[in-house]
Image: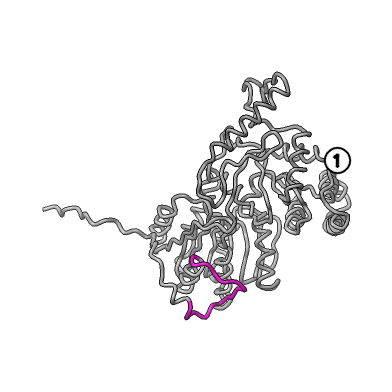
Amino acid sequence: LPKSHSTAPRKSYAITTPLPLSTYNTLTPALTHPFTLDDFQKQAVLRLENRQSIFLAAHTSAGKTVVAEYAVALSRKHCTRTVYTSPIKALSNQKYRDFRRTFGDDDVGLITGDVQINPDASCLVMTTEILRSMLYRGADLVRDIEWVVFDEVHYINDADRGVVWEEVIIMLPEYVNLIFLSATTPNTIEFSDWIGRTKRREVFVIRTNYRPVPLSHYLYAGGKLCCVMEGGKGRGFLDWGWKEAKTLLAGKKKEDGKEKSNTGRGGGRGPVEKWMQQGNKQNWTSLVKFLEREGLMPSVVFSFSKKKCEEIANMLRSLTLNTTNESNAVHTFTTQTCSRLSPTDATLPQVLQICEMSKRGIGIHHGGLLPLLKEMIEILFSQNLIKILFATETFAMGVNMPARAVVFNGLRKHDGTGFRMLQPGEYTQMAGRAR
């Protein structure tokens, strides 16, 4: 007779049961900090000490990097390697600088498509594509890897590049422990269960809704900020703020007279809503002065067009946001940086333009810049020498910079196939740069 089908539920590889935190107090940690760890960080440390794979879902600036640093400390203790992967070079460059400050120059290396620094280090920072290439080649260093950290792992949803993350997860040897970090993955349990079934091991999910700096969301209308959601108050969407912005825009429209239709590129799109328009020189000058007056600098302005980033920055030629001492510091740093370029490259219009803007506290960051210029802008911004930065979406991929405010130039983007509205996860990722 045929056997009856089992009705037992399928095993879940995603484990959410927390460990008792009392065991953390008996631990001799591989890495100590001058501050007290939050509960979710302690849970992660305990799992790492047990050599278990984890998925850590926490808001931007909540302290996910502490967990990655602890993995590096453990690999140094065990004389193994930790590989830290990221989706973009900007994040790799920043984490390389951060880890060097924590662990020293000799123990940290960087491998990207552009550079290869200290490839024999115990902590290697690289893009995910580089790790995939190493796995394909069967590189010797793979034998020494104990931990692989996947930062911004929600990038696996990317239609073009997501397959890279899938292949790396599948190809990694079973002795390698996995750490997944993300602020915007909505289905952490399902994703962790897929990883667990693929690798035949349990993945421990650690989540927290705590955000150190609650975000408030505003609409800038008629030279005024209208609050539509107040951070940390739990009041939800504020209708009165939306109505106030709408009234201000309606009043502005009457003052400006009959509004001209905006047909956009290629024509035929019809009139564009007032709040979707890109703004002119007067609008941007007023906004930047407003941000400066309200103490909301440094700020990041996200624009989904490289050309628009440069156009808006060029509108602000009359503004100087740095003090004399700051401008001198920028001049010294840009001169030293550009000395690494050939004489021909150092006189390129792009190089001269970026250096001149930087002295005035204005920066541009997008994929069309020379890698050296992008790194220069990132360092200047981290030192508060760039007061307003016009950047494309890639700057939001986990790059932890000291922005007081984030401004969106629009909510429509081109995703490679056509224009669409920004998705909630993308908005959260970019808005989270403010802290």
Q: Nearer the viewer, residue 256 or 414?
A: 256
Amino acid type, callout 1: Ser
Residue for point 69% across, 56% down? 402
Q: Is residue 47 left or right of residue 87?
A: left
* SS under mark 1: loop
Question: Mark 1 Cα within 10 Å, few/some/many (few <14, many 20+)?
Answer: few
- Which stretch appears magenta? 25-40
Q: Is residue 271 above or below residue 87?
A: above
Counting from the top left corner in percent of width and height, residue 411 is at: 61, 37
Counting from the top left corner in percent of width and height, residue 141 is at: 58, 68
Q: Is residue 260 above or below residue 141?
A: above
Return the residue found at the far top. Answer: 258
Residue for point 15% across, 54% down? 3
In this rendering, does residue 310 appear at all?
yes
Q: Nearer the viewer, residue 162 or 191?
A: 191
Q: Is residue 411 left or right of residue 367?
A: left
Q: Is residue 20 left or right of residue 127?
A: left
| Residue 36 among magenta residues | yes
Report the coloring of the rendering.
Answer: one colour
Which quadrant: the C terminus?
A: bottom right
Q: Is residue 101 above or below residue 126?
A: below
Counting from the top left corner in percent of width and height, residue 430 is at: 61, 47
Residue for point 39% across, 59% down? 14
Residue for point 56% across, 71% down? 36
Q: Is residue 49 left or right of residue 375?
A: left
Q: Is residue 82 above or below residue 234?
A: below
Mark 1 lies on residue: 318
Q: Nearer the viewer, residue 295 or 91?
A: 295
